[in-house]
Amino acid sequence: MNIARVDLNLLVYLDILLRERNVTKAANQLGISQPAMSNGLKRLRDLFDDPLLIRTSEGMTPTERAKELEPLVRKVLTEIEHAVQPRSSFDPEKSNRVFRIMASDYAESTLIPSVLTELRRMAPGISLDIMTPSDVSFLDVEQGKVDMVINRFDSMPQSFHQKTLWYDNFSCLLSKSNPISKDFNLDSYLGAQHVWVSKTGMGVGVGINPADVQRLGWVDEALKRLGKKRDISVFTRHYQAAALLAEQESLIVTVPSRLATLQAANPNILLLPPPFEIPKFELKMAWSPLLQNNPAHRWLRKLMATVAERLSEQAN
């Protein structure tokens, strides 16, 4: 096959089709008509001598050949985008760019305030649009619709670039009037009522099954290894809300230590180390390969990493 005779726009069509797995949605993404996209799919099938996408009861399903092509096509398009991107430098002092960042309220509370302080000093025209994990899908990030995501992740697409910002331990928050505050040990911890809080990953959350320990996260998995289980009376996805609930006399809240220290000045709350070992976790930022070489994005990533490093040094 003579590459000069191949319409490289077809690779763009294929990339979008394999992401959306829907001709109409793919056409909308490219701003073309549905018949034009259907014709593009026909030409792709002729080019690769393969149906590529087959209609099944679950929608359009990629063939084995399509699955082989998907990462290759994405890599080729990323390299082309990099090659044609202007190499002009980024001037943060003159920029009015809006960066869209998905951040858990843990990251929003512990990292973003310091980032904003630096932005006001270095780039006063730049704005941040902070989105919640439920606002964003991995596809949004992959397509560059969201600049970066900052959270704890159980899993992440291999194509994403990522960087660990810091590691954090856990601390317990409880009311100073809580009777167990004077004798805080594993038995008194297990005898109390607890607030569960977590929102890792991205996408719309689902209801929690208290019996499904594996989905409950770090704290409950650590207890399971001891053959123990805590009594959870409140489930929430918001760390700040959980911290406020710690003022109630009967509740214990076990949260990341950096978030717990935000309550250090609260006269009604005690901060105590957990009476059992809980492994540390990573806070990561991740972004699309499409943005890897963007000058403005590189600047923001460096700023995030620098601020996170400084906060880690202060925490230690």
Image (tube, rainbow, N blue to C red):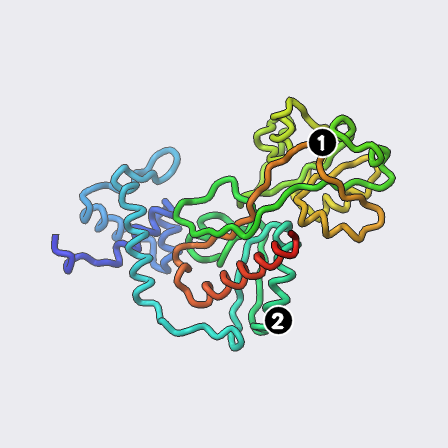
Compared to 292, does 232 lie above or below? above
Residue drawn at (83%, 36%), measured in percent from left and top? 181
Q: Nearer the viewer, residue 170 or 119?
A: 170
Q: Spatial distance from mark 1 to mark 2, Cα to Cα? A: 41 Å
* Position in image of residue 37 (x %, y %): 30, 53
Q: Does residue 36 show up? A: no
Residue drawn at (28%, 49%), measured in percent from left and top? 72
* Position in image of residue 34 (x %, y %): 33, 53
Task: Determine the residue located farthest toward the top in the rendered image.
Answer: 227
Q: Nearer the viewer, residue 228 or 206?
A: 228
Q: Residues within 10 Å of mark 2 (few under 14, many from 20)?
A: few
Quarter of the image for residue 127 reads: bottom right
Instruction: Name the front one of labels 1 and 2.
Output: 2
Disc 1 designates what residue? 232
20 on left or right of 164: left
Q: Nearer the viewer, residue 237 or 270?
A: 270
Residue drawn at (65%, 56%), measured in percent from left and top? 314
Marks 1 and 2 in Cβ contact (< 8 Å): no
Kind of element beneath mark 1: strand
Q: Does residue 110 show up? A: yes
- Name the amino acid, label 2: Arg
Kind of element beneath mark 2: helix
Quarter of the image for residue 58 reads: top left
* Position in image of residue 266 (x %, y %): 81, 51
Which badge, 1 or 2, comes first in the chain's sequence?
2
* Position in image of residue 140 (x %, y %): 46, 52
Residue drawn at (18%, 47%), measured in percent from left and top? 46
Q: How many marks can you see?
A: 2
- Name the amino acid, label 1: Ile
Disc 2 designates what residue? 120
Q: Nearer the viewer, residue 281 or 38?
A: 281
